[in-house]
Amino acid sequence: MNTMFKILNKLVPEYLSSLVPLRVGDRTHYNLRNQDNLSLVMANHVKTYNSFIPKSVRDWNSLGPIKNANSLEGFKTLYKRDNIRTANKIYNIDHRGGNVHHTRLRLGLSPLANHLFTHNIIDDPICSLCNIEVFKMKQLPITCLGVHILPEKRLFFFQVYLK
């Protein structure tokens, strides 16, 4: 939205300002309720519909009185005040380490063999402790056969998987 504010207030080069459509009030001589809104950009494909200019125009039109801020700093302050987002409580664990591990598992970026294989970091998805090929998230330290069968590797397993 900061970029859109800059474009509409001529704080960017002309080649960027020329990409944004005219305001509704500039296109007609009638006194309309939405005369301060930008004209919508027509799009035939989802890619075009979600690209920068059409999406920014839709978002800009939905802002309300914030659009009339006098300066960029004033706009930023009003925008942040009205668009405060709070994190979902299910992703907030008491300590940072737990948050990191939960996020890694949720995004599929943990040191589990399957995740490493999916991102082409290792050559095969076979667990180095229990030699079982796993393609699902069930291969956690609690259910790994290597942890239960090989007690000497248990400490190593938890150090590697819980870092």
Image (tube, helix red, strand yellow):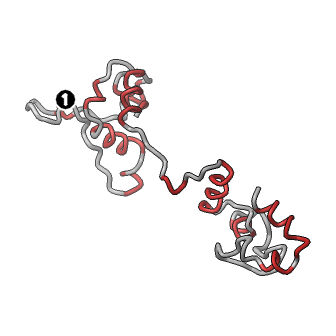
In which quadrant of the rendered image does the C terminus lie? bottom right
Instruction: Where is residue 18? Give x, y as percent.
Output: 36, 30
Question: Is residue 149 depicted above or below 70 in this figure?
Answer: below
* Amino acid type at image mark 1: Asp
Question: Is residue 155 depicted above or below 89 in this figure?
Answer: below
Direction from residue 138 to residue 13 in the image, left or right: left
Q: Residue furthest right?
A: 152
Residue named by callout 1? 26
At x 86% / y 64%, what residue is drawn? Answer: 156
At x 55% / y 51%, what residue is drawn? Answer: 92
Q: Quadrant of residue 13?
A: top left
Asked whether 76 or 122 is in front, the reply is 76
Q: Quadrant of residue 56?
A: top left
Instruction: Where is residue 101? Give x, y as percent.
Output: 67, 57
Disc 1 secondary structure class: helix
In which quadrant of the rendered image does the N terminus lie? top left
Asked whether 143 or 131 is in front, the reply is 143
Q: Residue furthest top?
A: 70
Q: Residues within 10 Å of mark 1 (few under 14, many from 20)?
A: few
Instruction: Where is residue 67? Give x, y as percent.
Output: 30, 29
- Counting every numbered tag in the picture gives 1
Question: Is residue 49 depicted above or below 34 in this figure?
Answer: below
At x 74% / y 70%, what residue is drawn? Answer: 141
Question: Is residue 86 depicted above or below 93 in this figure?
Answer: above
Direction from residue 61 to residue 33 in the image, left or right: left
Direction from residue 16 to residue 37 in the image, left or right: left
Asked whether 120 or 135 is in front, the reply is 135
Q: Residue furthest left?
A: 30
At x 38% / y 21%, what residue is drawn? Answer: 74
Q: Quadrant of residue 144?
A: bottom right
Instruction: Where is residue 28? Give x, y as percent.
Output: 13, 33
Asked whether 43 or 142 is in front, the reply is 142
